[in-house]
Image (cartoon, rainbow, N blue to C red):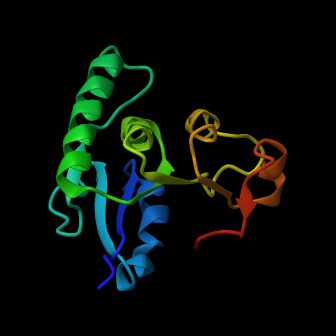
Amino acid sequence: MKKQKKICLISSSGGHFEQLKMLKELSRKYEVFIVTEKTKYNKDDKNINSFLIQVNRKEVLFLVKMIINAIKSLKIIIREKPDVIISTGVLATIPMCILGKKFHKKLIYIESFAKITSPTKTGKLLYKYADRFYVQWEEMLKYYPNAICKGGIY
């Protein structure tokens, strides 16, 4: 019997997580696990398998939190052994995406629905690593010429 692909769905909390939840249909065909930032709003969500630390680019402990998230991400990759990592961004997800590529996992990145006229910093970074990169607006193809535009995931 052929092994079922295992997919890691990962995003920051808030709107990025709401977009990620639109991909729940994948769990009908694949084994799926979810990783996001731990916040007071989702800490009791039984659908989330693992939590990362919430990160803000402008805070003093930014680098420390990114290192902690890298360690957490490495542990998750070793424990869960995903075949594919799908991310809607942003900061907290970068270590998982880059480490996943180092472990030869497929990376699919979906640029935020909210980005219509300018790219995200995370998107610009992960565009270099992604096996597939999706934008939700045709206007974004000027920033990501090799991206795929299939419209919004809502």
Residue at (48, 54) in percent of width and height: 106
As drawn, 60 above or below 104: above
Counting from the top left corner in percent of width and height, residue 84 is at: 42, 59
Query: Residue 74 appears at what percent x and percent y?
Result: 25, 39
At 20% from the left edge and 53% from the top edge, which residue is drawn? 50
- How many numbered marks, from 0 up? 0
Classify residue 58 as left or right of residue 125.
left
Residue 45 placement: quadrant = bottom left
Residue 70 falls left or right of residue 16: left
Which residue is depicted at the point 71% across and 70% down? 150
Q: Quadrant of the C terminus?
A: bottom right
Residue drawn at the location 38% of the way across and 54% of the way down: 10
Residue 146 percent location from the top left of the image: 77, 50
Q: Can residue 72 be seen from the camera position used here?
A: yes
Q: Quadrant of residue 26?
A: bottom left
Task: Mark yes or no: residue 39 visible.
Answer: no
Classify residue 69 as left or right of residue 30.
left
Q: Quadrant of the N terminus?
A: bottom left
**Closer-to-camera residue (82/143):** 82
The answer to whether 103 is drawn above or below residue 64 in the figure is: below
Q: Residue furthest top?
A: 60
